[in-house]
Image (tube, rainbow, N blue to C red):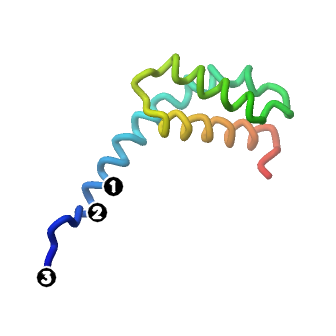
């Protein structure tokens, strides 16, 4: 059986958890930073999302674009659930 080039699943999961931990550690401060931007119910649009990603990129230059997108998505989901707009 040829197993060259196959990455064990556990190493991928461990790496994902480390990245997720970094993003999780920044969630509360990101929520505080972005909450005013999304304070109005109609604020969940492309312009606000772009501004949110830009603000997080400035606040956390060590995060990748994918991590910033994940963080913005998590903040938006949280705010929508809190406001009763979980649809």
Which quadrant, please, contains the N terminus? bottom left
Inter-mark Cα distance, 1 to 2: 6 Å
Residue at disc 3, secondary structure: loop
Residue 1: assigned label: 3
- Residue in the image at 68% along x and 37% along y: 76
Depth check, mark 1 against mark 3: the one in front is: 3
In the picture of the structure, the residue carrying the numbered disc 1 is 13
Residue at disc 2, secondary structure: helix
Please state which of residues 59 and 54 is positioned toward the viewer in this rendering. 54
In the picture of the structure, the residue carrying the numbered disc 2 is 9
The residue positioned farthest toward the bottom in the image shown: 1
Is residue 54 depicted above or below 10 in this figure?
A: above
Is residue 7 depicted above or below 73 in this figure?
A: below
Residue 84's x, y, as percent? 82, 43
Please state which of residues 41 and 32 is positioned toward the viewer in this rendering. 41
| Sequence-wise first label, 1 or 3 | 3
| Sequence-wise first label, 3 or 2 | 3
- Residue in the image at 86% along x and 33% along y: 42
Residue at disc 1, secondary structure: helix
5 relative to 77 in the view: left or right? left
């Amino acid at each position: 059986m040829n197993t060259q080039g196959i990455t064990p699943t556990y190493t991928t999961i461990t790496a994902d958890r480390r990245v997720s931990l970094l993003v999780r550690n920044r969630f509360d401060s990101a929520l505080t930073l972005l909450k005013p931007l999304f304070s109005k119910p109609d604020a969940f649009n492309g312009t606000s999302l772009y501004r949110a990603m830009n603000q997080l990129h400035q606040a956390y230059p060590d995060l990748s674009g994918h991590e910033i997108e994940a963080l913005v998505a998590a903040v938006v989901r949280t705010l929508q659930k809190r406001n009763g707009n979980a649809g």
